[in-house]
Amino acid sequence: MLKIVISIFLFVSLALSYDSYTDDKNIYYTSKNFQVIVGKNSSSKEEMAIKLLDSAQFVWEKEINQLGFKHPINSENRLIDIYIGNTKAYNYETKSYETISSYYAGWATSYNDNTPYFLINSILDDDLIKVTISHEFFHTIQYSYFNPNNIDDNKWFKNIWWLEATAVLMEDEVYDDINDYINFIEPFFNASYKDIELYNGSDEYSKVIFAKYIKKKYGLEIIKNSLASFEDSGDDGFFEILDNLLKKDYNSSMQISLNEFAKWVSNSSLYFEDGAYYPPLKKVDISNNITIEKGGIININNLKIGWNMTSLPTGKLKNIDELNSSIVWSYKNNLWSNNITTNLNDINSSNGYWVKTDKELSTYFTYFDKTKTLDISTLEKGWHLKGTTNNISINDLDINQDILIWQYKNNQWYLFTNIYYNVDDYKKLDKIEQYSSYWIYIK
């Protein structure tokens, strides 16, 4: 299904040959692979019908013959119907007139024998006709890789995000010069931390940006294979399917890909063809207390000018462009290391770091950068520099040992201890904030 975002362009007809005929209720306009259906008293819609046929045949050539996707089910035996909504176009199988809300440009479904058809809004301008046909036709292709009737509602709704993301992707693959997809990406850039499987009428379309990353990085074959794996994937959805395919065929994973994707969308103009037109990835403050949801990423304003005690996202330090000119220190296993004179390469969000910067910076974390609540019993005696992506309340800790916990924030030291009691020179540490780090000493 595609929502409407109004735009105005000129349509150049391909002047394809077509036939027409009527019955008691409808007028039918046919081409090689498609049949446009309007109400019998809607002859004024002939011009739109021809535009739909022109675009549909062009899309067929692109998505099937050039990009190599499967034919829609039963399309070798019958034409694919395109109803123009709100024209009294009559559907003999459902015994109803096809109507569509002005909110939607189109949607796809199928007849009882699984032959797909789709409905197009009658108010579309010329380029919206093109991108809508590209989008809805790709839904009919998706249904050739699995039987929608075999997918229960729970599985269906949690996986709509990938079906819509790849359908919007096809709009830009077929008509690269229109760029209508950019109108749909703002929900992701405004709240990239949200569940990648979120289905609410807008967020699922915005995930086209992830589909564009996957296509550019790994090609279209992984999209085809993800669709082919869907029906037999059990409780796994496209998130897990993609993870399995990336591990099996591409020496990668969703964790690796999300980390790189976070880098791309943080610097869109460097990595995406149309990236200069994308909105900026919204940055959030630590105090917002936002939790990263499944498949999400978050851009945190966590580094101020000077020295910072902080957590950093798991991965290769060299991949975090923002830290290229910064000094980063780590303390682990009683040893100091840094990115200048020693070999500090791999970082982990569960470890803590000292970072010195000459400007305020933000770093991005992904769904996989999740740290467990501090379990003091797992720590050996001595000093540890730890990090966290969760808020940790000191009152919630199970403390059975003598400990010190230090944290440096806002140019001041905060302390919790059950060893010393005359510590009036320091502010009391009640909470360790998410995306920060802390010293902990076990006596």
Image (spheres, rainbow, N blue to C red):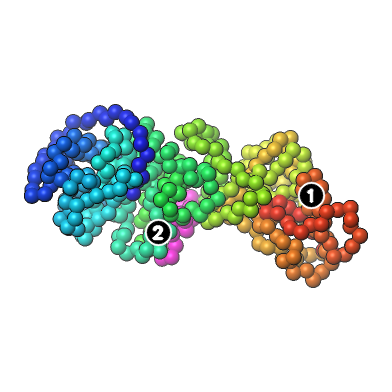
Residue 173 visible in image: no
Residue nearest the observer in this picture, 215 or 415: 415
In percent of width and height, residue 30 lies at 15, 42
Q: Position of residue 433 (x, y in %)?
A: 70, 54
**Tag on residue 408?**
1
Residue 206 sits in quarter: top left
Residue 7 position in % (x across, y down)? 35, 33
Total numbered labels placed on residues in the image = 2
> In the rendering, at what x and y percent does residue 373 appear?
68, 63
On the rendered structure, is 11 left or right of 222?
A: left
The residue at 32%/52% (across/down) is 142
In the image: residue 282, left or right of residue 360: left
Closest to the observer: 436 or 32?
Answer: 436
Q: Secondary structure at mark 1?
A: strand
Q: Which residues are drawn in magenta?
A: 234-251
Q: Which residue is the site of mark 2? A: 157
- Sequence-first tag of 2 and 1: 2
Q: Element under label 2?
A: helix
Magenta run includes residue 250: yes
- Classify 10 Å Cα crowding around label 1: few (below 14), some (14-19), many (20 and above): some
The amino acid type, in three-letter code, at marker 1 is Tyr
Q: Chief secondary structure of the magenta span?
A: helix
Q: Is residue 396 above or below residue 160?
A: below
Amino acid tagged 2: Phe
Quadrant location, the C terminus: bottom right
Q: Which mark is residue 286?
A: none
Q: Is residue 222 left or right of residue 354?
A: left
Please tell me whether residue 217 belongs to the stretch shown in magenta. no
